[in-house]
Amino acid sequence: MFGTGTQGDAPAIRDAGWMRNKVPAVTALFWVTKLLTTAMGETTSDFLVKTIDPFVAVGGAFAVFAVAMVLQFAVKRYIAWVYWFAVLMVAVFGTMVADVLHVELGVPYAVSTVGFAMALAAVFAVWYATQRTLSVHRIDTRAREMFYWCAVLGTFALGTAFGDLTATTLGLGYFGSALVFGILFAIPGVAYRWWGLGGTAAFWTAYVLTRPFGASLSDGLAVSHARGGLDLGTGPVSLVLFAAIVVCVAVLSARDRAALEPVGLASPSLDDAADASRP
């Protein structure tokens, strides 16, 4: 889905400061794992801030988030468990950031949604202005890697605020929001396959929508009946989601080992070439 990218050996360019593409191929399992991390980020964040002191919870989540990001930047290539550990901690910490603005500072979800959307747009604008690409098949320099993770953090914060806006402020409820965002999530894939939407635009649109889609589903499972949920509890739901993520990452790691061969740099994918040919 949205292409997988290819890699080829180019040591001379690597010596000039380039590196192997450090993000996974965009496949169906990628999207399943991404949805699971967004869902777990929502319930884990809620469980932590309601079980222990909120300031301790946020501070601890930030510390683990920082460790995950340092580890991700330290490795020289894409490693499944390192990458998804970073994504999961972005989900947990990004959720807390969005929730703190509303719960602690009283910022309405409509305001935070617009604010996060503007911040994410600014990240994309600066990224494209300096790198001339937003493709996830070309995360092959340190600058692009930094822009990529800034964008990922922005999508989680935006998706959290957007999902809470529809579920609570607009009154759709968690399962109603999940239905809406599930449909919206499918549209970029359909547009990419049949309507000529570029792979990069389709990817980032879908990526933003995974957050409210997954979070609305997990909230619907976890929260009380009074809030429109199934009342399974944030702790149990988080544990089940974590187990599912472990299975997915194990499968991804096994695929990587099976396909392991000498590789060099990421080269433009077919999606990049198609994007370049479109007006």
Image (spheres, grey):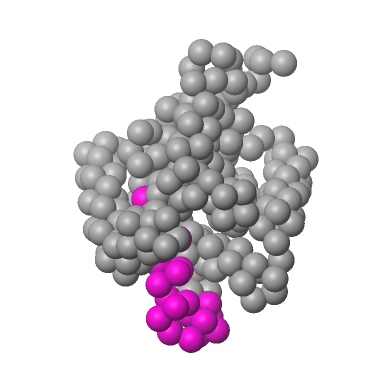
Q: Which of 231/138 is in front?
A: 231
Does the segment drawn in magenta span residue 182?
Answer: no
Does the segment drawn in magenta span residue 56?
Answer: yes
At a point 66% along the width and 15% down the height, the residue shown is 278
At a point 33% along the width and 62% down the height, the residue shown is 231
Look at the picture and state if 130 lies above or below 26: below
The answer to which quarter of the image holds residue 3 is: top left
Q: Which of 200/253 is in front?
A: 200
Left or right relative to 38: residue 195 = right
Magenta span: helix, strand or loop, mainly? helix
Residue 99 in sight here: yes
Q: Which residues are magenta?
A: 36-59
Residue 146: x, y in percent? 61, 55
Left or right relative to 266: residue 31 = left
At a point 48% along the width and 25% down the height, the residue shown is 189
Residue 179: x, y in percent? 45, 38
